[in-house]
Image: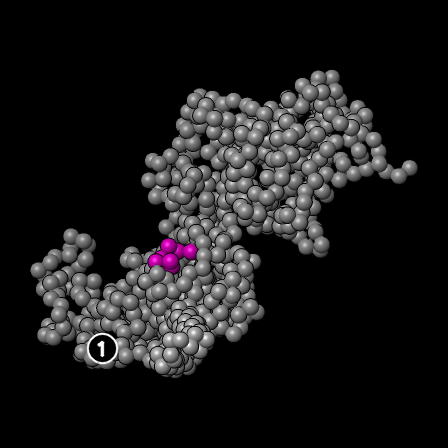
């Protein structure tokens, strides 16, 4: 073969080019004498001219390279293949992910969907192989039960029709046997049908489709707002699964970088949950690493992991190479542990005679050798066959640019409107469709997402920001002129819209809530209690547009009768209320406020489409003015982001009562907000003419022991 005299490792581009030239000479020789296999080689013959596509005649890109089936078995006579390169690139990635030498199997795919398809198909075969003995026993039981049922039915025909009791007893035996047969068939069906668990709404859309094709059960699991699978919800769904399908094996899809948020699932927690709750069932974890999987060993989302398969309970990993590192053709890789792979295909009869008894473990059979060479070339160009230094530098630059863009977008939209949950992805309010098209942004609802990879330079970011700022100014100018609004007191008619606004705003964009991983359904319980009290008190305001759609809302109350949270209803909010308690302690502790003296302006939200236009201030000041007309002298407020805090500029008589740094706040010896920068603040302001802060002590009586 051509490659026997070629060194395994390359020290320079020139040596790799020399190798490719040697390969080209070999392939050209094969093409000249090809008689057997049904391919016409039109581009090689020049009948189809690919130069218009930029493909040079007489190059490896202009001739068929076909890797058929398992790359670990060379074809006997279909020799126009590059399986040696495919095996070597698998070997490079094998070492990269911490597998032992020659412990990886897999192949180069057409992309993430095929990688997921192969991963789920192999997993199904593996899980069935794990219970094969039980399947055989169950099948034998069914055969015996069917035979016994037939014997019972034959015996029934021999009982005289007038012997009612005897016939009833026999019929009962037949019915019992039918039930036993059905139970055995149910067990057999469960053994043959693993159940796929995945994060609802965030796992790649190919997974439910593949599960349908492979006839797998599916269990979508609610996700956190960042897109990662909710482990507590996984535990609940797994418990339900064990009750309804006690014999069905478990196949979990773990996302390593979702498309929109870049979320990474907690794979160690998934493994631990399964082993604690379902140790009796066979299971496997498939990692969909479409975006971030290629750099997972450098990002270290699970800390220092020596072997990303053994340590995490993972047997398969799919990566999209056109996403990261970023090849020019859609392709990827599916990797699996050798022991897993061999068990999955231990009973296979899929070998193909006419290409040399190759086991076809692939989805497509024939596969592009050019994709293999491009992937192989990329790994060597990045130096991954020698080490990770070059790839690490590229990754660091990606993250540096992403953080820079994040900071710049916050200056435009405000910190509450821009999300940077993970390494590459930044989400912000959707700009005009012209901007979205020019920069090919990912649009979901009222949000746009940028994925900062190697093509995203500082220069491109600067151009984008300039266009975005101009676009935003035009849009805001238009809105300022055209957006008429009305202010109303919060009433029963507004409740549903207000609950939706607060839930979405605080779960998606408010940093303190987002950090706690609060889901919509958890937060709605809290919001509902707040709104019900607010409607009764009549101190809160809503801002509506001309179509009577909700723009903004602020909740206000009399500090003499403050909202008392029921933390048992929404326990995840406990750190937030503890933070507010510490923040407000200097102002509230030891005081019983008199009714109608101090208004608490404490809870506000603005629709994402109207943020940055001052509607938070409009809503807040509407509450303050209404309170002043009712005779309130002061307004007290806590702020957990600097954008909301800007409303304090409206007051002439103002005092900062306290501030708490997020990173330093402790609750039960833990720091729940260490990831947040900045501080929470608490202010009191005089809201009626002629009132100063000296008379604040007339608004309460002391409750401190004398």
| Residue drawn 11% across the image and 66% down it | 40
**Position of residue 135 measured from the top left corner of the image (x, y, whole percent):** 40, 78
Task: Specify whether residue 204 is painted magenta.
Answer: yes
Q: How is the image coloured?
A: one colour
**Above or below — where is 10 with respect to 406?**
below
Q: For residue 562, what is the image quadrant?
A: top right
Q: Position of residue 155 (x, y in %)?
A: 37, 81
Question: Relative to 204, is 531 above or below?
Answer: above
Which residue occupies the extreme front position in the image?
A: 162
Q: Residue 201 location, x and y as percent?
A: 43, 51
Residue 137 occupies quadrant = bottom left
Nearer the observer, 81 or 535: 535
Instruction: Confirm whether residue 355 shows in the render.
Output: yes
- The extreme top residue here reads 690
Pointer 1 local density, CA inside 10 Å: few below 14, some 14–19, many at least 20: some
**Residue 123 rendering spot, x and y as whole percentages:** 39, 70
Q: Is residue 26 magenta?
A: no
For the N terminus, give its image quadrant. Answer: bottom left
Pick the front one: 109 or 143: 143
| Element class at badge 1 | strand
Q: Nearer the viewer, residue 557 or 132?
A: 132
**Which stretch did the figure color magenta?**
203-209
Where, quadrant-wise, is the C terminus in this rendering? top right
User: Compared with residue 575, is residue 496 higher up or lower down, i.e. above or below?
Assistant: above
Q: Is residue 390 visible?
A: no
Q: Is residue 427 left or right of residue 635?
A: left
Residue beneath the point at 18% across and 75% down: 78
Is 117 drawn above or below residue 614 in the view shown?
A: below
Residue marked by disc 1: 352
Q: Residue at x 11, y 75 (%)?
A: 36
Q: Residue at x 49, y 54 (%)?
A: 222
On the picture, is 694 further left or further right than 558?
right
């Amino acid at each position: 073969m051509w490659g026997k005299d070629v060194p395994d490792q390359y020290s320079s581009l020139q040596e790799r080019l020399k190798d490719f030239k040697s390969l080209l000479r070999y392939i050209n020789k094969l093409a000249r004498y090809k008689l057997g296999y049904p391919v016409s080689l039109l581009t090689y013959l020049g009948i189809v001219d690919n130069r218009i596509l930029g493909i040079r005649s007489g190059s490896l890109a202009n001739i068929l390279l076909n890797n058929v089936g398992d790359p670990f078995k060379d074809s006997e006579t279909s020799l126009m293949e590059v399986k040696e390169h495919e095996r070597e690139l698998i070997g490079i990635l094998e070492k990269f992910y911490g597998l032992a030498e020659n412990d990886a199997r897999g192949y180069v795919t057409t992309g993430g969907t095929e990688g997921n398809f192969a991963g789920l198909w192999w997993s199904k075969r593996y899980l069935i192989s794990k219970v094969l003995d039980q399947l055989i026993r169950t099948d034998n039981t069914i055969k015996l039960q069917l035979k016994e049922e037939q014997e019972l039915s034959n015996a029934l025909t021999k009982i005289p029709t007038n012997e009612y009791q005897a016939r009833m007893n026999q019929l009962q035996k037949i019915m019992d046997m039918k039930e036993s047969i059905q139970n055995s068939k149910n067990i057999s069906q469960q053994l043959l049908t693993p159940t796929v668990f995945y994060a609802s709404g965030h796992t790649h859309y190919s997974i439910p489709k593949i599960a349908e094709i492979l006839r797998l059960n599916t269990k979508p699991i609610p996700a956190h707002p960042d897109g990662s699978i909710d482990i507590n919800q996984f535990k609940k769904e797994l418990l339900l699964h064990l009750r309804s399908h006690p014999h069905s094996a478990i196949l979990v899809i773990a996302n390593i970088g979702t498309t929109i948020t870049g979320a990474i699932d907690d794979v160690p927690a998934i493994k631990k949950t399964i082993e604690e709750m379902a140790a009796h069932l066979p299971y496997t974890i498939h990692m969909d690493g479409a975006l971030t999987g290629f750099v997972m060993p450098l990002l270290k989302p699970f800390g220092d992991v020596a072997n990303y398969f053994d340590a995490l309970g993972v047997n398969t990993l799919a990566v999209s190479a056109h996403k990261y590192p970023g090849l020019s053709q859609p392709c990827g890789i599916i990797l699996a542990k050798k022991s897993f792979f061999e068990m999955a295909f231990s009973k296979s009869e899929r070998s193909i005679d006419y290409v040399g008894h190759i086991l076809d473990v692939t989805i497509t059979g024939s596969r592009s050798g050019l994709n293999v060479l491009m992937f192989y070339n990329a790994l060597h160009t990045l130096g991954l066959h020698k080490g990770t230094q070059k790839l690490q530098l590229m990754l660091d630059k990606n993250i540096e640019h992403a953080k820079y863009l994040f900071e710049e977008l916050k200056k435009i939209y405000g910190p509450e409107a821009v999300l940077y949950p993970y390494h590459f992805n930044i989400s912000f309010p959707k700009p005009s469709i012209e901007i979205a098209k020019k920069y090919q942004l990912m649009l979901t609802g009222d949000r746009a997402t940028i994925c900062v990879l190697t093509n995203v330079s500082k220069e491109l970011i600067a151009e984008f920001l300039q266009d975005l700022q101009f676009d935003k100014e035009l849009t805001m100018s238009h809105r300022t002129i055209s957006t008429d609004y009305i202010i109303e007191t919060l009433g029963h008619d507004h409740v549903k819209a207000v609950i939706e606004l607060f839930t979405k705003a605080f779960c998606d964009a408010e940093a303190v809530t987002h950090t706690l991983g609060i889901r919509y359904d958890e937060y709605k319980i809290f919001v509902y209690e707040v709104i019900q009290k607010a409607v009764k008190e009549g101190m809160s305001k809503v801002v509506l547009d001309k179509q009577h759609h909700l723009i903004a809302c602020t909740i206000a109350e009399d500090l003499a009768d403050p909202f008392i949270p029921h933390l048992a209803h929404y326990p995840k909010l406990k750190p937030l209320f503890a933070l507010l308690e510490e923040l407000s302690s200097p102002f509230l502790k030891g005081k019983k406020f008199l009714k109608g003296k101090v208004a608490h302006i404490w809870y506000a939200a603005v629709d994402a489409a109207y943020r940055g236009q001052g509607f938070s201030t409009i809503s807040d000041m509407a509450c303050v003015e209404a309170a002043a007309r009712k005779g309130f002298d002061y307004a007290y407020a806590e702020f957990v982001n600097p954008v909301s805090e800007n409303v304090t500029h409206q007051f002439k008589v103002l005092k900062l009562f306290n501030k708490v740094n997020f990173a330093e706040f402790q609750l039960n010896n833990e720091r729940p907000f260490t990831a947040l920068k900045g501080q929470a603040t608490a202010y009191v302001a005089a809201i009626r003419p002629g009132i100063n802060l000296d008379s604040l002590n007339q608004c309460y009586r002391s409750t401190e022991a004398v």
